[in-house]
Image (cartoon, rainbow, N blue to C red):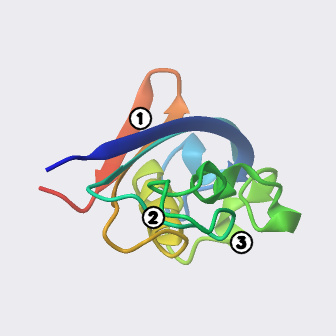
Amino acid sequence: MPSWTLNTEFKFDSAHFIEGYDGKCGRMHGHTYKVHISAKSNKLNVSKYLNSPDMVCDFKELKWAAQDVTKGGLDHAILNDILPVSTTAERIAEFIYNETKKRIPAEIELKITVWETDNSWVVYSDED
C-alpha cells in the first residue's frame, strides 16, 4: 500500500512555569521551542486550500502553532494561559498533537517532536 509522509519543522517563543515544580522551572521563564511534525497517510486528501485530493494535508494546518498567540498559535504566549494541563514538554507535545488532529483528516498518523532546548526533547504519538 502506498504511503506519503509529510515532515515540517518550525519554532515558536513562549513563556511558562511548571506549577508545583520544586526548582527553577517552577518560576516563569521562556523557551524557543522547536517542533517537528510528521504526518503519514495512505491516501491523498483535499484541504480547505486545495479542492482536489492531492495532499496528505496542508503544511499550513501542521504549522498552526507557529502563529502568534493573537492568531490562534503559541508564539509569544504564556502557555499556562492556554494549556488546560501542566506545561511540561510532554504535555506541550500532547497539546500540539491534539490540536493538530482537529485540523487534518482523521486517518493521518501524526508524530510530534518538541525540543525545549537543543539537547532536551520529547516525541509524542498515539502509536505504541
Mark 1 or 2, closer to the camera: 2
Q: Earlier in the sequence, mark 1 or mark 2?
A: 2
- Kind of residue at disc 1: Trp
The image shows residue 111, relative to residue 120, as above or below, that is below
The residue beneath circle 1 is 121
Q: Marks 2 and 3: which is nearer the front?
A: 2
Residue 123 position in % (x across, y down)? 33, 44
Q: Which residue is identified by label 3?
A: 81
Mark 3 packing: few (<14 Cα in 10 Å), some, or many (20+)? few
Q: Residue furthest front?
A: 52
Against 98, residue 125 (above or below) is: above
- Residue shown at 73% from the left, 48% from the top: 14
Does 113 sit left or right of 70 as displayed?
Answer: left
Q: Secondary structure at mark 3?
A: helix
Report whether residue 34 is seen: no
Give the Cα separation between the discs numbered 1 and 2: 31 Å
**Which badge, 2 or 3, comes first in the chain's sequence?**
2
Residue 32, numbered circle:
none
**Please, what secondary structure does the residue beneath circle 2 have?**
loop
Residue type marked 3: Asp
Which quarter of the figure has residue 10?
top right
| Residue 17 visible to an observer of this rendering | yes
- Which amino acid, by three-letter code, is at mark 2? Asn
Query: Mark 3 to mark 1: distance in Å?
Result: 22 Å
- The residue that label 2 is drawn on is 45
